[in-house]
Image (spheres, helix red, strand yellow):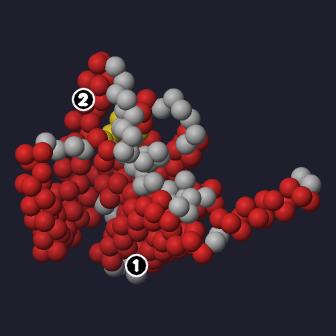
Amino acid sequence: MSLSDDRRAERRLARSLSLRALVPNAITAAALCSGLTGIRFAIAGDFEKAVQAIILAGLLDGIDGRAARLLKAQSRFGAELDSLADSISFGVAPALIVYLWALRDLPSLGWIAALAFAICCVLRLARFNARIDLVDQPHKQAGFLTGVPAPVGAGLAFLPIYLWIASGMVEFSNAVAVSVWMLLIAFLMISSLPTLSWSRVRPPSQLRIGLLALIGIMMAALLIEPWWSLAGLTIIYLAFVPYGIARYMRLKRRGAAPPDPSAPSHQADSVPPTV
């Protein structure tokens, strides 16, 4: 690479780190710090705060992409930062938290299950990055995702912890059952199953007022009974997985649905802040 090429690369990096671009990237960095802090809480044995830290990371991860689009601050640097942060916050951190909570009682199988979850999360993010510029993506063109998004996968992995905290029953921390559960969620993340994305969720107009009321009730439930509510939301999401597959197959039989012009151009595990 010549000196002029080096200077052009430096100028492009400087533009990607402008003050405007720092806002979504700072949110991504905050999400990463929240995920790492979840590991710290798990080491201290405070699993409630550990899970809350990962949930906060997921909320921040859902904001950074929208902030980047609003500020027109997309850059390749931010896309790479987002993927690296997601791999830690929603792959490595949940795997370690669940391992320290229950899987260490079964060192061999438990550690393999934790490793499988973390590796599958990283592989999912790598697959998304590799396909980001491909035109031929049947699931995306029909408004679906491929597999379970990384933040959602982290939330699903915590289902046994939600139930354990809410009920106080030690049966939910059974190392064998939790290992199998982690392997199942790992498979869902790297699978090629079509899953529903927000762009495909269009409730009938006559139900939208009721849906708003339901969302309000759900928020109240999260404040009053957060762990039972999180468990319920997780189970509802899992129930929608076969529905999404069936809906995609119906669309496929009728012919590929045209791309949704109102949907973001990159539908993934939370749109990267700078894609």
Q: Secondary structure at mark 2?
A: helix
Residue 40 visible, this orientation? yes
Query: Label 2 belongs to which residue?
Result: 246
What is the x, y in percent for residue 248? Answer: 30, 29
Q: Is residue 218 left or right of residue 9?
A: left
- Residue at screen point 12% across, 75% down: 224
Instruction: Count neighbours of disc 1 (C-alpha within 10 A) and say few if under 14, some if 14 to 19, many if 20 or more.
Output: some
Identity of the residue furthest to the right in this view: 2
What is the x, y in percent for residue 44? Answer: 40, 81
- Residue at screen point 17% across, 44% down: 203
Amino acid bearing label 2:
Ala
Q: How many marks?
A: 2
Residue 103: quadrant of the picture = bottom left
Residue 12: quadrant of the picture = bottom right
Which-is-in-front pick, marks 2 and 1?
2
- Residue at screen point 36% across, 78% down: 45
**127 and 254: which one is in front?**
254
- Residue at screen point 58% across, 68% down: 21
Residue 236 disc label: none
Query: Label 1 belongs to which residue?
Result: 41
Amino acid bearing label 1:
Phe
Q: Is residue 78 above or below residue 139?
A: below
Rounded to the nearest angstrom, the CA distance separating label 2 from label 1 is 40 Å
Q: Is residue 163 left or right of residue 76?
A: left
Instruction: Count neighbours of disc 2 (C-alpha within 10 A) and say few if under 14, some if 14 to 19, many if 20 or more.
Output: some
Q: Is residue 68 left or right of residue 250?
A: right
What is the x, y in percent for residue 275? Answer: 55, 53
Work out whether mark 2 precedes mark 1 in sequence or the reverse, and give the earlier one.
Answer: 1
Q: Secondary structure at mark 1?
A: helix
Q: Is residue 200 above or below residue 108?
A: above
What is the x, y in percent for residue 202? Answer: 22, 43
